[in-house]
Amino acid sequence: MNFELTPEQIELQESIRAFAQAEIAPKAEELDRVGEFPTDLFRRVGEMGVMSIPFDPQYGGMGLGVFDTVLAIEELARADQSLAVSTMVSIATGLTVQRFGTEEQKRTWLPDIVSGRKICSIAGTEPDAGSDTGGFKTRATQLENGQWSLTGEKAFITNAGTDLSSFTLILAVSSERDAPKKQFTLFLTPNDAPGYTRGAKYRKMGWKSSDTRPLHLDDCQLGEEHIVGGKHGGRWVLHKGYQAARLFLAACSLGLAQASLDLAIGYAKERQAFGGSLGRLQLIQEMIAKMALKVDSARLVTYRAAWQVDAGKEDLMALSMAKLHATETGSEVANLAIQVHGGFGFMDECPASRYLRDNRICTIGDGSSQIQTLLIARECGLDVSFN
Ligand SMILES: Cc1cc2nc3c(=O)[nH]c(=O)nc-3n(C[C@H](O)[C@H](O)[C@H](O)COP(=O)(O)OP(=O)(O)OC[C@H]3O[C@@H](n4cnc5c(N)ncnc54)[C@H](O)[C@@H]3O)c2cc1C
């Protein structure tokens, strides 16, 4: 077993780290305060080639793997998890089109996503159903002229309302109302499609500069050429998209956990208490050691799951373990970083308080910790029911 990164991976990691620390980290506090999607900074992420890492060269990509993408997202999140999330949602959505879209869809929509000139989103969640994907109600009805008409509501969708937003993959029920089995189709919905509107952005606890909105579909008419993954094949395709996002979200929490650890170590060395540095107190040392252990174990499970995907050995248990462990670690380590900082940790000026707010959604989105736990139990051979 080889735990070493290749020289190319080290180079990629170091270049993204240098960029993220120089251009993103110094702006993270202001981005959190202002709460607007940073269009110019996202374009810079694109210019740095981050968006292009896992895409085919024929669409402008670098043709690298999911593992390389995880390394890059981790570095972005170490500087600002909110921007890392916007980036990873667009990559995961683009990868869904690359894997399941038609050649025409790929040629039309991917180059702008891969270059970072545009951003895209994927919409499953609805006001009445999130984890329960079978409970989605947005309906796609095929009209006599062959067009599809979409009507319904989506909730909490990332990236759909920015200046750079290009399209959203929208999941809708496509079977007849009285069909014995509910079936779903995924539609590539351009931003300017008639009948498709984006609501006002939510006020949120964290991820303030990442765009999150409800979407409304009112007789939004789309042709067959907008279907991704075939008629009635949408739920499976959405789950595959969510699985990629799950791994990238683990990387987001991993980067944030590393930033929390770095911050706590720096403060423990610098802060004076009881006649010496805080870091010489054994209970502070215990917290730092615990954080270091958690970050390292989260990195191991995340990297292993990413490596498996690239090696064609995708393992659902390993994916769920990475998502569950890394995202829970992000919250635990950010919380400990606040503890090390004492009262200052509670202040908005202390990055650790932002880290805790930002990471809070990571144990909920893209399959919550409860759902990942059930998936792991199912892979252990237990009789797990989602009903
Ligand atoms: C900032 C933000 C961005 C998001 N971006 C997107 C996006 O881009 N695209 C998208 O489609 N969605 C997005 N979401 C939605 C997110 O994926 C959902 O919130 C998440 O899947 C949980 O669904 P829910 O909110 O409906 O909660 P519910 O599914 O109602 O769950 C409520 C609680 O019940 C638990 N629970 C649910 N089912 C079970 C079960 N069987 N057993 C035990 N416990 C269970 C859950 O873990 C949770 O604790 C986003 C959400 C937020 C807040």
Image (cartoon, rainbow, N blue to C red):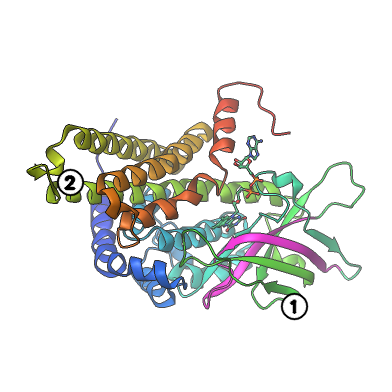
The stretch drawn in magenta includes residue 164: yes
Q: Residue at x 15, y 50 (%)?
A: 271
Q: Which mark is residue 177?
A: none
Residue wearing tag 1: 194
What percent of the width, then of the height, locates residue 142? 86, 63
Q: Residue 102: x percent and y percent?
A: 64, 62
What kind of secondary structure does the magenta stretch mostly adopt?
A: strand
Residue 332 point in image, percent of width and height: 38, 40
Q: Quadrant of the C terminus?
A: top right
Indicate the secondary structure of the residue bearing disc 2: helix
Residue numbers of the magenta segment: 146-173
**Residue with the mark numbered 2:** 268
Image quadrant of residue 17? bottom left
Left-right relation of 245 to 355 = right
Residue 102 among magenta residues: no
Q: Residue at x 57, y 70 (%)?
A: 109
Amino acid carrying label 2: it is Ala
**Displayed quadrant of residue 375:** top right
Depth check, mark 1 against mark 2: the one in front is 2
* Quarter holding residue 76: bottom left
Left or right of 182? Residue 382 is: left
